[in-house]
Image (cartoon, helix red, strand yellow):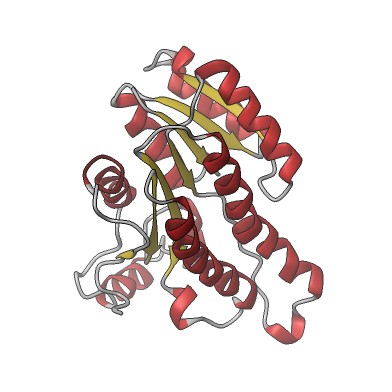
Amino acid sequence: MKTILITGALGGIGRALTESFLDKGCNVIINYSNEKKAEDFRKKLGERYDMNRSLFFKADVSKFYEVEKMFEAAKEKFGQIDCLINCASINKDAYIRDMDAQMFQNVIDVNLVGTFNCSKLFAEQYGGNSGAIINISSGTAVHGRAKGANYCSSKAGVINLTKDFAIEFAPNIRVNCIGLGMIMTDEIYHRYNLDNPEKLENMNKSIPLGYIGDVSDVVEMVDFLIFKGKYITGQLIYVNGGMFMH
């Protein structure tokens, strides 16, 4: 039975991953920042799963001492953590001329520093020979976008951290990165006003495979990289329907 830590686990992808791992009989540490959303999710999970196999832990991943406490609590309950999925991420969009230093730094701190903090502590506590870290990045990390200098820079950094981790943590820990395109989460739905049928149709047409991805598409790739991709490390793998090819 594997023990999985998912940061930012209350987002659409994090929730789907949590339920998928619980379905497989894994232990799951559910990292979160919003107490109300965590309580709602806890109640939902309690209707289907043995909650002794889960640990909800509130921690700001950008703060190393809070991440340390999370790892200590996880070790006390489950022992070793076998897999880490770095999902925690924020957006604070603004054109560069309107983006102050704090707005830039906040996104870097959560998305990039948070990935470093959690991965460093994961590697230090892991004592096995088949560990895995999955980092979540974005196609915009490579091609950029307007009003995203902070986000795109942070996600580009995550791609490079993946390579550095893969080299330094080998051979006992494999580290890979998933570059997301359009995945139907609440954040994407509201950001692009996809309740508008015309906007939804245009978005679908912009994707070579013809539709916006589902969170299950991400879950399937994570499953593959953790349970089957034994000879894959240091790689950036796109899950985007061909929206961005590299």
Q: Can residue 102 be seen in this view?
A: yes
Q: In which quarter of the image is the N terminus?
A: top left
Residue furthest bottom in the image: 97
Q: In which quarter of the image is residue 199?
A: bottom left
Q: Is residue 9 visible?
A: no
Q: x, y (%) of residue 25?
A: 32, 21
Task: Please state which of residues 27 and 35 is positioned toward the viewer in this rendering.
Answer: 27
Q: x, y (%) of residue 81?
A: 48, 30
Task: Please state which of residues 121 and 144 is positioned toward the viewer in this rendering.
Answer: 121
Q: Is the residue 211 above or below the residue 83 in the image? A: below
Q: Is the residue 177 above or below the residue 46 in the image? A: below
Residue beneath the point at 37% across and 31% down: 19
Residue beneath the point at 49% across and 39% down: 6
Left or right placement of residue 146 versus residue 136 in this view = right
Residue beneath the point at 51% across and 21% down: 79
Q: Quadrant of residue 3?
A: top left
Residue beneath the point at 47% across and 15% down: 51
Q: x, y (%) of residue 153?
A: 59, 74
Q: Is the residue 14 above or below the residue 95 in the image? A: above
Task: Please state which of residues 183 and 18 is positioned toward the viewer in this rendering.
Answer: 18
Q: In which quarter of the image is residue 223?
A: top left
Q: x, y (%) of residue 157?
A: 55, 69
Q: In which quarter of the image is the C terminus?
A: bottom left
Q: How many marks?
A: 0
Task: Please state which of residues 16 and 28 is positioned toward the viewer in this rendering.
Answer: 28
Left or right placement of residue 216 versus residue 4 in this view = left
